Image (spheres, rainbow, N blue to C red):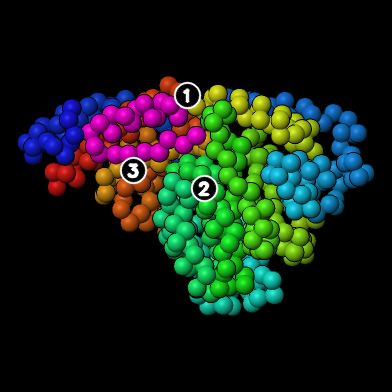
Amino acid sequence: MKNYRDLTPEEMKQELAQLRHVYDQVKAEKLELNMARGKPAADQLDLSMPMLNDLNTLDDLISEDGTDCRNYGTLDGIIEAKKLIADLMEVKPENVFVGGNASLQLMYIMVANAWCFGIDGCQPWCRQGTVKFLCPVPGYDRHFRITEVFGIQLVNIPMHEDGPDMDLVEQYVNNDPTVKGIWCVPKYSNPDGYSYSDETVRRFAALKPAAKDFRIFWDNAYFFHHLDFDHPDVILNIMDECQKAGSPDLVYEFMSTSKMALPGASISAVITSPHNMDQLKHQISAQIISFDKVNQMRQVKFFKDPQHLAEHMKKHAALLLPKFQTVWDAFKELGDLGIARWTTPRGGYFISLYTLPGCAKRTVQLCKEAGVTLTGAGAAFPYGIDPEDSHIRIAPSYPSLDDLKKACRVVVLSVKIASLEKLIG
């Protein structure tokens, strides 16, 4: 089949009629497949089951400083967990605050504290009138949701293969005092899978915010989630670069072990400067006495150090890469027809599929009616509005390989139908 754009109107109608016939046959199969979220599959979760057996004696639950992990106390995490995360993220243990199983919770806490109490002696955001947050798009819908619930105005920033449009970021941050933050997924970004270039990271560190209470929310969720361990993406350490630029307080970095181990029983962390850390501990001490130290010790016993973690993550990659390859192989047909493009990341959990403008919502609707649930079109944009209506986030991880092949067949068929409907008008 040649490029759809080169077909005559009559050829388009004939092709669409044939595709609708195939589509009706697929609907009759009554599929029930879900690719809506980037959840680890059961075989990935199985890799971490030995973790549940790592604490067998009382000695296993006593921290090196004598803390009994079964009891109250130690607000910012046991020293072993702080050291493990510091080694993984190449920072100092004193820069690490260890939280519960969800880094998203820590992000919410940081926004909520700024909203209610302010940052660095500034007025709380809730008293400042207009407050804006920059949102590289397409991006992570749950990031956007956090700031949306506080009524913060979200501003789209286009994403490129080397990171956000930094000219636009600098224009906003350095000149508009109502801009208080930016969401970033710097490595294997959600959903494009792009990694920030050295220049991009340095430009972030060199920002000169018009607002004293501006912060970069640096969600390094996929720092160890390589699909190709022989050729992993490498990015600069934002904490180091901010220190060099004389702006050590500029960033809140986040991480978690959620997709490394068991998402419902992992640990997370905020990594930031001592000055920011003091403020965080002061504010959060009114909310919680301590997070789950027993689970912190369990993670330490299981992962041990960066070398052991790397070996563990290679097992994840061995399960994930065939699924990503299945999606890429299926989508080749769309590229030949000139009606879609997609990303080919070397890590992370997602693939971005870009249809012809005006076709994403229709594609997702067709998939749903044929029994395949995708993330809603527009979800990767603030307020759920994709100006081009062309982006769909593909999450290959959760279905089995056989189910993924079936789902991809439906996605490809749906993109074809939506594209021809659009072209015919």
Seen at 24% across and 37% down, the residue is: 338
Q: How crowded is mark 3: few (under 14 residues within 10 Å), some or many (20 or more)?
A: many
Numbered circle sitting on residue 229: none
Whole-number angstrom distance, CA of label 2 to CA of label 3 = 23 Å
Q: Earlier in the sequence, mark 2 or mark 3?
A: 2
User: Secondary structure of the magenta portion, mostly?
Assistant: helix
Residue nearest the viewer, comparing 187 with 221: 187
Numbered circle sitting on residue 197: 2
Name the residue type under label 1.
Pro
Q: Is residue 166 above or below residue 258?
A: below
Seen at 50% across and 34% down, the residue is: 346
Q: Which of marks 2 and 3 is in front?
A: 2
Q: Where is residue 176 in the image (x, y as percent from the top left)?
A: 50, 73
Q: How crowded is mark 2: few (under 14 residues within 10 Å), some or many (20 or more)?
A: some
Residue nearest the viewer, comparing 218 with 377: 218
Whole-number angstrom distance, CA of label 3 to CA of label 1 = 21 Å
Q: Position of residue 41 (x, y in %)?
A: 54, 29
Seen at 42% across and 35% down, the residue is: 344
Q: Mark 3 sits on what residue?
A: 354
Whole-number angstrom distance, CA of label 1 to CA of label 2 = 27 Å
**Magenta highlight range:** 322-346
